[in-house]
Amino acid sequence: QVQLVESGGGLVQAGGSLRLSCAVSGNIFSIGDMGWYRQAPGKQREPVATINSGGSTNYADSVKGRFTISRDNAKNTVYLQMNSLKPMDTAVYYCKAYIRPTYYRSDDYWGQGTQVTVSS
């Protein structure tokens, strides 16, 4: 059974930094694209940053220059380094990964979410 476990959220003052981690465990044949998404109260879930298996990245305009996504393929883990945090970054952050548990199966898997709160 595949699981994504996130960690690293919390409360931080504006201008501060946090680093989120998301570790994939279970029966895994391969992992493709990985990414971070966020959902603020009353808003739809939105993409923050994605990274493919080769290391190519994409960022939402609102976080470019402040957030950095990376992955450690040996550890099946994706990270999100968040600097210069703003109150508008307050949300529940979710990681997502496109995973093949076996050669014949594939699907998107989500973590349980971690709260990030930025105070002004």
Image: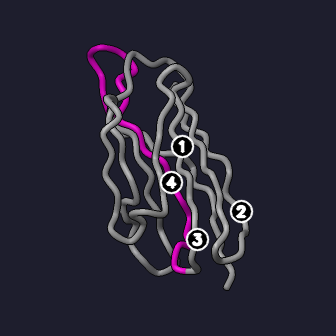
SS category of the residue bearing label 3? loop
Task: Check disc 4: other Cα within 10 Å, few if <14, some if 14-19, many if 20+.
Answer: many
Q: Earlier in the sequence, mark 2 or mark 1?
A: 2
**Residue 79: mark in rendering:** 1
Q: Nearer the viewer, mark 3 or mark 2?
A: 3
Q: Which residue position holds label 2?
A: 10
Q: The disc labelled 1 sits on which kind of residue?
A: Tyr
Residue at far front of view = 65
**Residue kind at label 2, given as amino acid type:** Gly
Q: Earlier in the sequence, mark 1 or mark 3?
A: 1
Q: Is residue 120 left or right of residue 3?
A: right
Residue 89 within the segment the image draws in magenta: yes
The answer to the question of whether label 3 and label 4 lie on touching residues, with beta carbons closer than 8 A, is no
CA separation in Å, label 1 and label 3: 16 Å
Task: Say what secondary structure mark 4 lies in.
Answer: strand
Q: Please provide percent x and percent y for residue 81.
A: 56, 52
Residue range in magenta is: 88-107
Q: CA distance from mark 2 to mark 1?
A: 15 Å
Q: Kindly identify which residue carries mark 3.
A: 85
Sequence-earlier tag: 3 or 2? 2
Q: Quadrant of residue 102?
A: top left
Name the residue that disc number 4 marks. 94
Nearer to me, 80 or 76: 80
